[in-house]
Image: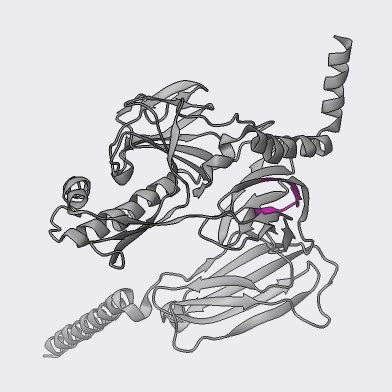
Amino acid sequence: MARRIRVRRKGKGSMVFLLLFIIAAAGAGYIYTAPEFERIAPTIESPEHLFWNRKDPLKITLKDNSGLHSYKVTLSDGKNTVVVGNGIMEGDPKMKTLSVTYPTGKGLNPKSKSYTLNIAVTDKSLWHFFGGNTTARKIGLTIDYTRPNVNVIANSRMISQGGSALVVFQAEDNHLDKLYIQANTHTFAAEPYKKEGYYAALIAWPFTEDTFDAKIVATDKAGNRREVHIPFYHKNPHYRTTKIRATDKFIDGKITDLASSDPEYAQIKDRLEKLKAINETMRLKNEALIHKLSRHVSDEMIDAWHVKRFYPLKNGKKVASFGDHRYYYYKDKNNIVSESYHVGYDLASTRMADIVASNAGRVVFAEENGIYGNMPLIDHGLGLYTLYGHCSKLLVKEGDKVHAGEVIAKTGMTGLALGDHLHFGILVQGIEVRPIEWFDKHWIRKFIDNVFKEADRIIAPQQKSSQKNKMSKS
């Protein structure tokens, strides 16, 4: 009898143990799978090393997939440590950007050139016995509050509305980060020139903008910034405004032909809507491609840069000027239905005449481009590009290197052209400029070549004197 009682008690204990095991397993399974117990640690987004001017706040971004709970930030000079930020984050955000400022008062050595930023962040997870997941980072800081050194060495003395200019300058900083020229709302890249710390850049004044101001902007990795104004005399040439009659023949001919070649416009039936779509929408799309292709400037150092005057079409006569603002009217001159700018210089001679590359360069595009028809685009270096529109035949392809005097295409009337001619365009870093300046060897010598010569006397005076000595000995 007693033995039976003991057996039953043993079986009851086993059941209790099994029940407890099931409960524990279920609890463990819940802990390992429940979102409240997630185990992904927060992230601290920052490079391993930063430069700091101590004036601008440091921006450090914290992130967590479930939500951030608390953080602590300290700053150390190697001997002393100061808390520069800590707290609980309300609402458990998944992202927070900390703004770390240099502490006022005593505590850190103000003469120290390097600090260590220590950051610890914990998320809202219940993992680690409800303590959450924690991430800690050490970030090295180099202190730099010296602005970059920038000096204009030489520049074109004048720039015309719609024209080009050259500037050669010096820019130095141990931690130089960004360097560019700000001209109105446009930025222009500079190419390293002749020796380290010197740069050259062609810049442009868009013909649609009435005023112009240009400055060199240099910033370092610590956020120090220097701006230097480039002195230019300004010239405002007159650009024509013309009214052009849009006839049914024109719309049903060239405009319809262009529309039918592109599915985006092929279904448009209304004449005036079709005219506006091709003359404005397609035109802007074509020009956007041109601007994109002609923005590139090499970052490799050049020792010299020179171009001869451009003369793309022998015995070519001007048939349209650069910068014309054209208004298209339908039937009545007051009924303006479309408008556009002519951003090239049209030349005509004989049918299918030879088009010549006046200067060496690399072909960056040689295909059909909407209203421009068959169109080569050539990079001549320093951000200068030439464009040849409406060609009947292309004799070069993308990637080709062309030589001065090489025939690259034949004139034609592809695209939005009513007669055989060449639409010749010049761009400086994606901005159309006055071709007439680059047709003129005197303008090139005065505003480009002489600027380089003036700069060379400062940048490499020994080089020039040694060259003279060699010439005198020979």
Tell me the quadrant of the picture where the N terminus can be found.
Answer: bottom left
Q: Residue furthest front?
A: 332
Which corner quadrant of the image does residue 398 belong to?
top left
Q: Residue at x 52, y 41 (%)?
A: 435
Q: Main structural element of the magenta stretch: helix, strand or loop?
A: strand
| Of 78 and 364, the residue lying toward us | 364
Display coloring: one colour
Tell me the quadrant of the picture where the C terminus can be found.
Answer: top right
Residue 206 drawn at (x, y percent): 54, 55
Q: Residue at x 39, y 52 (%)?
A: 288
Left or right placement of residue 268 versus residue 75 in this view = left
Residue 317 drawn at (x, y percent): 44, 33
Q: Residue at x 47, y 43 (%)?
A: 294
Which corner quadrant of the image does residue 420 belong to?
top left
Q: Is residue 467 above or below residue 270?
A: above
Q: Is residue 115 above or below residue 427?
A: below
Left or right placement of residue 368 versus residue 178 in this view = left
Left or right placement of residue 27 versus residue 160 in this view = left
> Tag count in the figure?
0
Residue 183 drawn at (x, y percent): 61, 58
Residue 264: in magenta span: no
Q: Is residue 155 above or below residue 413?
A: below
Left or right placement of residue 128 versus residue 84 in this view = left
**What range of the chain is rendered magenta?**
166-179
Residue 173: in magenta span: yes
Residue 447 visible (yes or no): yes
Residue 253 drawn at (x, y percent): 18, 46
